[in-house]
Image (cartoon, rainbow, N blue to C red):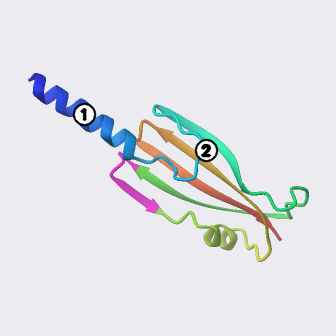
Amino acid sequence: MKKLIMLFVVCFALSALVGCSPVMSPITGLIFTELKAPFYAGNGQDLGAKVGRAECQGFLGLVAIGDASIQKAAENGEITNIKAIDYEAFNVLGVFCRFTTIVYGD
């Protein structure tokens, strides 16, 4: 029984390490992550009149689906001239995670 519990603990720890941690995030929490950060600030003053979002989700560190590309976010916001890009990351124990790309422009 002890070996089974130890195996479960090791598998959980490994899945937390390789799960749904955003690749470009400056900081992530092992238990919980909720952050917003800039990716490209442009001139930092004129963000434009439109906002587009695209996201992907992951489950249990085993399955990840979605399209969080800049192109998809621009399409969703009907943006042809991108002025700035932000992103959001959300993760709870690697059980559920979400990564969102936010594009600003005209």
The N terminus sits in image quarter: top left
Please provide percent x and percent y for residue 6.
18, 27
- Measure how far apart labels 2 and 1 are at the Cα level: 26 Å
Residue at image x 25%, y 34%?
10
Q: Farthest bottom residue?
A: 80
| Residue occupied by mark 2 | 26
Q: Residues within 10 Å of mark 1 (few under 14, many from 20)?
A: few
Is 101 one of the magenta-colored residues? Answer: no
Left/right of residue 21 with respect to residue 34 in the rendered view: left
| Of 64 and 78, the residue lying toward us | 64
**Residue type at tag 2:** Pro
* Quadrant assignment, res 83: bottom right
Residue at image x 83%, y 71%?
106
Left/right of residue 1 with respect to residue 100 in the rendered view: left
Residue at image x 12%, y 29%?
4
- Secondary structure state at the residue bearing disc 1: helix
Is residue 46 placed above or below 90 in the rendered structure?
below
| Of 49 and 91, the residue lying toward us | 91
Which comes before the other along the chain, label 2 or label 1? Answer: 1
Is 60 one of the magenta-colored residues? Answer: yes
Please provide percent x and percent y for residue 77.
72, 68
| Residue occupied by mark 1 | 10
Magenta-highlighted residues: 59-65
